[in-house]
Amino acid sequence: RAPEQLDNFLSIIPSDFSLSLGLVDGRNIWKNDLANSLALINKVLKKIGSERVLIAPSCSLMHVPCDLNNERNEQELPSNIKSWLAFAKQKVEEVALLGKLASPQTATDLLELLKNNQTIIKERKDSPLTFNKLVRERISLLKESDTYRQNRFADRKLKQQSVLQLPKFPTTTIGSFPQTPEVRSWRARLKKGELTLERYEELVKAEIAKTIHRQEEIGLDVLVHGEFERNDMVEYFGQQLLGFAFTQNGWVQSYGSRYVKPPIIYGDVRRPMPMTVAWSTYAQSLTTKPVKGMLTGPLTILQWSFVRDDQPRAETCLQIALAIRDEVCDLEKAGIGVIQIDEPAIREGLPLRKQEREHYLEWAVKCF
């Protein structure tokens, strides 16, 4: 972080200070480019000597999963993508290896490890898995006008009211309903092959029907289908988008005793087919009241994933935004009149440095 400050800091560091180089990224899961890190280490060593230099991660390793060796599901995390990664255990090994490589006498076997590292770094850089021509072409054709609504809010509000016929203060819920242990067990049984997909969908539809009827009894104005088919508000969408990979045991702490398995965004993001339309249209078929389409926004998907570090986060977020936009269009075509896009993490992405916040908010709002 902030490598541009290194030269200035080296020129003013007091002679009785030691310098800890946080060269191994503790917040993301990509393998360290050892050659680049070594270049920085050698630059510092020439300036202040080896006695005052420490090599370390950039922060606590609590933000990354424990051990990459625990990932054995080739379907969820293919071996070629897995080779690009480093979890906490591997990051500690990278720190130790950098220390050894920076010493005056470097063993031949260590140089071989450096060579292997550079091969993997190059393979990732050149991999067709990270690049999607259709996505890049679409982004290149975007215009500034594409980020603005075609009609004023006042005009949209009148049209919406004429169609939806809602009261002055319409009532609704946030979207997701509590999932009982039984509902969660259906997904587990489906994964194990104990339930067919057809039977699983029958069970979920029955739960949706109960939820719709209960909301009608209560007297809500805009209904939701309950999201019983979803495991997580980010993972559910990531599993249906190209450019995402997943772990079996990549748990990290969210807060307190809550742990999550963030998806891994390794390549260009594209939506190959509708993700929520079938469930939303089924729910809408059960009632004459409007049922909301429920989507997770691009910024939240970005913030709650391990994001590729070979392009700006803004570019990755824009790719996700286009995928969500396609889903919105399909929901509209299917007759869903109300669509809610959740962005609980938009504030989380705000940079700590005040001078960087305006740029973040500019591209974040553009993506939304």
Image (tube, rainbow, N blue to C red):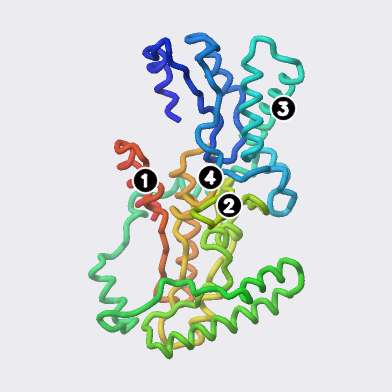
Quadrant in the picture for residue 350: top left
Amino acid type, label 3: Asn
Residue identifier under label 3: 116
> Label 4 crowding class (10 Å Cα cut-off): few <14, some 14-19, many 20+?
many
Per the rendering, the mark at residue 228 is none
Per the rendering, the mark at residue 307 is 4
Residue occupying the point 32% across, 57% down:
148
Q: Are marks 3 and 4 in contact (CB under 8 Å)?
A: no
The image shows residue 194, relative to residue 44, as above or below, that is below
Per the rendering, the mark at residue 263 is 2
Where residue 206 appears, x then y in whole percent?
59, 84
Which one is earlier in the sequence, the residue at label 2 or at label 3? 3
* Helix, strand or loop for disc 1: loop
Q: Are marks 2 and 4 in contact (CB under 8 Å)?
A: no
Residue identifier under label 1: 350
- Between the residue at mark 4 and the residue at mark 1, the CA separation in whole angstroms equals 16 Å
* Helix, strand or loop for disc 4: strand
Residue occupying the point 61% across, 78% down:
204
* Helix, strand or loop for disc 3: helix
